[in-house]
Image (cartoon, rainbow, N blue to C red):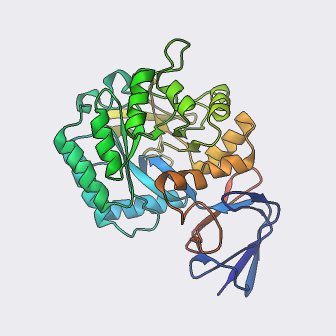
Amino acid sequence: MPIRYTGAALFDGTRLHPVADLTVADGKVTDSAATETVFLSGGYLLPGLLDLQVNGAGGQMISGRTTPADLRAFCETHARLGATGVLPTLITDTAEATAALIDAAAGAAGTPGLLGLHLEGPHLDPRRKGAHDPALIRPMTDDDLNRLCEGRKRLPALLVTVAPASVTPEQIATLTRAGVIVSLGHSDCTHAEAQAAIAAGARCVTHLFNAMSQLQHREPGLVGAALEGGLNGGLIADGHHVHPAAMRVALAANPAGLYLVTDAMAVAGTDQTEFTLGGRRILRRDGRLTLEDGTLAGADLTLPQAIGNLVAMTGTLPETAFAMATSRPAAVLGRADLGHLQHGAAADFVHLGADFSLQGVWRAGARLI
């Protein structure tokens, strides 16, 4: 039964229309005549939000012990927070944990919202470890490379964060040829080293500005390479990870390449005030997640909150912020079926209030909240 939604502005993935006229039927956006109309109370309708860096939910972190059932629950929790599609993200761990998570994700194939995996490490730079366990950070071996290339064949998408200190340009080129999305992060690399990795096929940066060599006038570092080269880059817009002025600079330098991520952790979707990561306490205080020494350890953030923060803190236009949580991450994954609400698209969409608060979530046309 075709249902029409109106009463809000509509972002279709490209443009913001002042009045929504969205009809869905059989889980898809359609141009069929509607038999029922739903009137919304203002705000914005936009495609289901997509999060390419999300480490935990419901009290649990993604790990080598994560099961297909856990992944289904994980996707459901994040859908109810507004992200109808996610890349569950494994923070630096053992080779065995990586293999086990790839098996679990392959076993959960077809789970609504499961877009693939993001492996953030272990092939990073210990000089920029952040909250990652330095004992597990290591260079990429041939076995690691083969595991990732074979894993990509079993998953809809695989994004891997690496540092030039722990991988070679040849390994990056091999991953890229295998269809792996290579992202640079947790790196103290020089501008020249970053450029070599980009030339080999790296096309993203992970949580821009955080845990990476910074832009300086004689050594532009990874930040300089990311902004100069127009890479795709995840941005944590919580006001703690990146100063609003730095966000404005990044948006001016790379206006089309940045997308929003939450870097959400185990507390997402819960009221928990702490959890453990690799045996270390992570504290949830005043919108921040930190180790006991104050090191940031992920973010206490949802994508609707990130959209609202970006608009309020930087003056970004709403339609740009919407694209950064919908069509841009879809493009990173090469998913032409997601991130827009054109005819034939999946009927995954969210309703945000005028203040960008989450008011409703639909997946395949069915309302979740």
| Quadrant of the rendered image containing residue 185 | top left
Left of 161 or right of it: where is 347? right
Residue 118 on image: x %, y %: 38, 48
Give the position of the N terminus as an image quadrant: bottom right
**Disc count in the image?**
0
Where's residue 342, x and y in %? 65, 69
Would you say 43 lies left or right of 120 here? Answer: right
Residue at far left of view: 143
Q: Nearer the viewer, residue 234 or 67?
A: 234
The single residue placed furthest to the front in the displayed view is: 199
In the displayed orientation, state which residue is furthest to the top: 218
Task: Look at 27% across and 49% down and name the residue there.
Answer: 148
Q: Is residue 348 above or below residue 51?
A: below
Report the side of 202 relative to 303 (left or right). left
Vertical position of residue 151 compared to residue 261: above or below: below
Q: Residue at x 28, y 30 (%)?
A: 166
User: Which residue corresponds to the image point at 25% horizontal and 59% vertical from the top-left?
Assistant: 103
Nearest the eye: 290 or 86:
86
Question: For this view, does 171 lie left or right of residue 289?
Answer: left
- Residue 229 lies, in percent from the top left, at 53, 33
Residue 247 x/y as whole percent: 63, 31
Image quarter of residue 243: top right
Which quarter of the rendered picture does the C terminus lie within? Answer: bottom right
Query: Is 341 above or below relative to 310?
Result: below
Regarding residue 241, the answer to whether it shows in the image is: no
Instruction: State the residue in front, 226 or 213.
Output: 226
Residue 179 visible here: yes
